[in-house]
Amino acid sequence: MSEPVLLFVGLVATIAFAVVAKRLALPYPIVFVLAGTVLAFLPGLPPVRISPDWIFLAVLPPLLFSGGWRTDWTMFRSNLGSILRLAIALVVVSTVVVAMFAERAIPGLGWAGAFVLGAIVAPPDAVAAGATFERFAVPRRIVAVLEGEGLVNDATALVIYGYAITAAVTGAFVLASAAGSFVLVSVGGIAVGLGVWWAVERFALWLRKYDLSDSLIDTLSIIGAAYAAYLAGQALHVSGVLATVVAGILISRRSSVVYTPESRLLAANFWTLWIYLLNAFVFLTIGLQLRALFAAGTQALVLLPAALGVSLVLIVVRLVWVFSVGLITRWIHAFRKSAPVQPWSSLAIIGWTGMRGIVSLAAALAIPYRTPSGTLFPGRDAIVFITFVVIFVTLVGQGLTLIPLLRWLKVGGASDGEQREIAVRIAALEAGLRAIDELERDHTAPYEREVLERLRDEYRHRIEHLRRHEPDGDAGESAESRFDHEAQRIAIQAERRAIMQLRDRGEIPDDIFRTVQYDLDLAEARLY
């Protein structure tokens, strides 16, 4: 099968599995890992050999940057202690425990290969959990802790991974040197991220100063920032992962000042689509990669018990860690008589949400096929196979049981997210009303007062509309709000039909049609 045909088949499969995920209301990573498993056993498909040199560069920068872009910095900072205990301490503990188990359970793997495997499967991926939480209301603190963990744990695991790869290749490893280098690499990565953010912001402001910016240029510079941060970190031998995350967080937080609304919308839509395609590419390709492993003689049935054992070790270690730390934290807070900590039900959700995903898979595929001396990398095929099994067990098993667990523990249900959003929107509209009142003092012409009065009425109507959505509203008000949305939607659709008729009759060119349609699409999107 030629590469163009294979690419076309991959795109068709991506669309088909997206429909399946939508139809079954499943997080798309779960559907993709199931699809990858099916591809591994379909007859007639060719095995695929992925270049390890390209896999990290293709996957990590956009994945990490988009995670930083969406990070709630306030929640991240307020839960920093919990995040670091999971993202650093637990990753180290998981790596060590898995390495100890794998060295005994997998003949010929050796300590270096065991630590490579441990570092690969240690960091959970927040993507599948986030896709599940979108379908079920979850307290914001749980989401913030898991998302924050997903940002930092990759850096911890990949630093360990790098040292383990070096040890497997050279046969040398010094623990004290690795520990000291970890601090230096982390601080250096943060510094590189700060530098990239500063350079990108200066460039964007320079473009605006000379009226040279537009949404495409801005979005390209944002995409470039992700790769610049990662490559600069790698070139300077510091953490490209942390550099990319830090750049994503800072550029996102400053985007409201630096970029136009069109640029922010385009960037957000790009990251959503690109991350979706990356997940599809990696998980579907792994199925074809597994075919190559089977063809090379990898004994899947022999390795399967060890792979299931590694999966069980990871699940148990995480649960024991989360509840042990939670118990210790409760004792400390009781002794200090300070604010209450997370309830046991929240700890159960955090402990169970340990699904492995695309970063682990990318790390496994990035293992070199051979050492510099030309010998095969010890246990590479076994590591890739075990990693896939761990992802399958945790992503499918824990992912599919997460919503039933949320319901059983009664963690989900009413969330304060919508109420907080309404309060913020009302505060913003009230600030707009105050600005209109200030304008009225200096603009007294009849047409100016007419314009300001019209704006004031619109703002007051929007505030009243939002207040009807507050939790203490009655059923009649909710019905009125629903009718308000439906009436607006019908009116917007009538506008869209009108401009379509004008375009079809040749009375307006397509560029004007698309401009007006874009505004109508934004207006309709605000109704949902």
Image (cartoon, grey):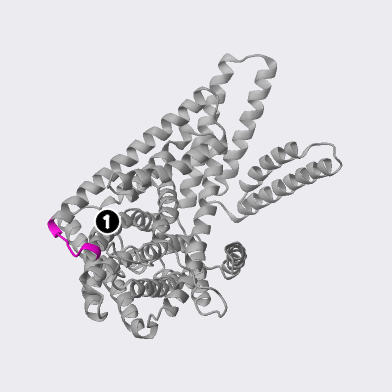
Q: Which residues are magenta?
A: 169-176
- Judged left or right of residue 480, residue 380 is left
- The answer, for residue 433, to whether it is visible in the render is yes
Foreground of the two, 1 or 522 = 1
Please identify the residue farthest to the bottom as the structure is shown.
Answer: 301
Location of residue 409 in the rendering, given as x and y in whole percent from the top left corner: 39, 70
Please identify the residue farthest to the right as the structure is shown.
Answer: 505
Is residue 446 highlighted in magenta?
no
Foreground of the two, 443 or 241 = 241
Location of residue 444 in the rendering, given as x and y in whole percent from the top left corner: 63, 14
Q: Is residue 127 above or below residue 36?
A: above
- For the point 58% across and 19% down, which residue is it? 440
* Residue placed under numbered mark 1 in the picture: 159
Location of residue 44 in the rendering, given as x and y in whole percent from the top left corner: 57, 78
- The answer, for residue 471, to whether it is visible in the render is no
Foreground of the two, 390 or 397 = 390
Q: Is residue 427 above or below residue 392?
A: above
- For the point 83% across and 40% down, which residue is it? 502
